[in-house]
Image: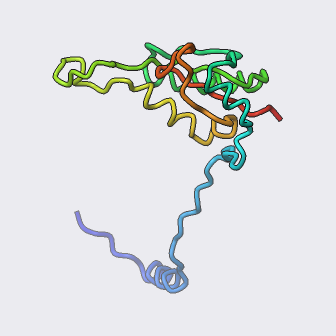
Amino acid sequence: MSRRVPTDEERKLFEQTFREGRPIRPAPLKSPAKKKAVTGASGVNGATQERMRRGLLEPDARIDLHGMTQGAAHRTLFTWLAAAHSRGYRLVLVITGKGNPKNDDNAPWMMSPHGVLKQMVPRWLNEPELAGLIAKTQPAHAKHGGGGALYVYLRKPR
């Protein structure tokens, strides 16, 4: 198979276009607008924070993510928190479970990551989609689950 030889007209057109040509720049990609995290005051006064710490406030709602897969827990938490915020709830309890509390590093169940939800839920709560809804998070009081649960204090709906 032989190469095709360009005609004189094609060559002139190429040279003219080449001289006039500008570098191709890709158009900047527009990312979908996300809600920005609200910064500044947390919206939790000192008395409320102290009552949360002592376990004197009862959560308006609670969700138990214990036993869910990471993907299912992520979707469930996002949907549930948005619904709780739209209902006007202020204090909600997110139960993650403690993970494996044993310190036996050689045990077979320790070969895979444990306490995944306990590690991931605080990260998820700081994502931009949720950060605008949340005023404060902190570990729950022992009577509400202690280290295996989190208080999430939601901002007032606007």
Which residue sits at x=43%, y=31%? Answer: 119
Place residue 48 in its image quadrant.
Answer: top right
Q: Position of residue 127 (x, y in %)?
A: 57, 40
Which residue sits at x=57%, y=34%? Answer: 125
Q: Is 23 placed left or right of 88 in the picture?
A: left
Q: In this view, does 11 lie above or below 46?
A: below
Which residue sits at x=64%, y=39%? Answer: 131
Question: 67 or 5: nearer the eye?
Answer: 67
Q: Position of residue 123 (x, y in %)?
A: 50, 37
For the N terminus, the image quarter is bottom left
Q: Is residue 2 above or below residue 32?
A: below
Which residue sits at x=69%, y=35%? Answer: 133
Question: 62 or 127: nearer the eye?
Answer: 62
Place residue 116 in its image quadrant.
Answer: top left
Place residue 154 in its image quadrant.
Answer: top right
Q: Residue furthest left?
A: 106
Q: Position of residue 146 (x, y in %)?
A: 50, 19
Colour pattern: rainbow
Q: Where is residue 28 in the image (x, y as percent from the top left)?
A: 58, 61
- Looking at the rendered structure, the number of numbered marks drawn on it comes to 0
Q: Is residue 85 above or below residue 25?
A: above
For the C terminus, the image quarter is top right
Q: Residue furthest right?
A: 158
Q: Is 35 placed left or right of 140 in the picture?
A: right
Q: Is residue 84 above or below residue 23?
A: above
Question: 55 or 13: nearer the eye?
Answer: 55
